[in-house]
Amino acid sequence: MYPSAFEYSAPGTLDEALSALGEAGDEGRVLAGGQSLIPMMKLGLAAPGCLIDINGLSELSYIRESNGDLAIGALARHADVAASDLVGRTNGTLAAAAPWISDPLVRNRGTVCGSVAHCDPEGDWNSVMLAVGASVVARSAAKRRKNRERVIPIADFVAGPFTNSLNPGEMVAEVRVPKYRGAAGGAYLKLERKIGDYATVGVAAHLALDAAGNVAEAGLALTSVHQHNLKVTEAEALMAGQTPSPELFAEAAEAAARSCDPESDIRGPADFKRAVVAEYTRRGFAAALKQARGEG
């Protein structure tokens, strides 16, 4: 199936890209990796009137430290995150998730920011971002300088399945991920039918410890078992301030299984998926704790 006709723009600067996007309004879409947008256009599920291709904007191809965060630019590919020593040193949840993103073809072309913006409930990155408390930087060509950039917490950015909180004329220019401060660790566990498949179940776990070795911060988010990527706030709250243990992780696992709402489908019955959520939550926090304690 061929997509409907559209205008194409390949700006040479970010300002030009934002200007083109602003002029296009609701009809404009940013083309980076194209691993979600192009298939949707071919299937008739998306019909933008104008594509703004930002692949020439090499200044957006970065992963760097910025004010205590990891800053991931709009053209940083999944494979860049997987290969980044900086990511490996500063956020174990991101490092664990990166090799699980689809297959090598998609990892080499697709972008983290594009995946985050797509808000696919079966996508891995937004669960990771919810678990670690990331933020999205939205840029626009607004005339008033103070309105050119918005920093949106990821929990507010994910508005629903395939729906984000961007305004017309805005694009995701960067994702900001908190670096580990002190003893911390993370994990991403994913059940898939074959390599490169969407998750049957995905669990992102993040754990930070205080000086006494208790839980200073816990993050937990689920993939493919709810209408959108789900942050399990109940589990996070019950763990705060507690001594990490298998019993505590089992409580969190029960809360996660209660919170999700999977469908029975070709990938398995709902009860099976809830059981996997519980098991992966236990394993994820156990792995995160081991990493936080420097045991592996």
Image (cartoon, grey):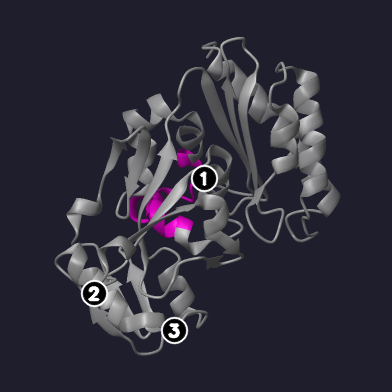
- Against 261, residue 65 (above or below) is above
Q: Position of residue 288 (x, y in %)?
A: 59, 24
Q: Residue at x 54, y 24 (%)?
A: 185
Q: Amino acid at mark 2?
A: Ser
Q: Nearer the viewer, residue 235 or 77?
A: 235
Which residue is denoted by mark 1 in the rendering?
129
Judge whether residue 280 can be spotted in this image: no
Q: CA distance from mark 1 to mark 3?
A: 28 Å
Numbered range of the magenta stretch = 98-116
> Mark 2: few, some, or many residues within 10 Å (few <14, many ≥20)?
some
Q: Does label 1 or label 2 sit earlier along the sequence?
A: 2
The structure residue drawn at horizontal position 56% and vertical position 45%, both measured from the top left corner, is 130
Q: Position of residue 57 (x, y in %)?
A: 19, 59
Q: Is residue 101 above or below residue 20?
A: above
Circle 1: element type: helix
Q: Is residue 158 magenta?
A: no
Q: Amino acid at mark 3?
A: Ala
* Residue 108 is one of the magenta-drawn residues: yes
Q: Is residue 33 above or below residue 101?
A: below
The residue mark sitting in front, 1 or 2, is 2
Per the rendering, the mark at residue 47 is 3
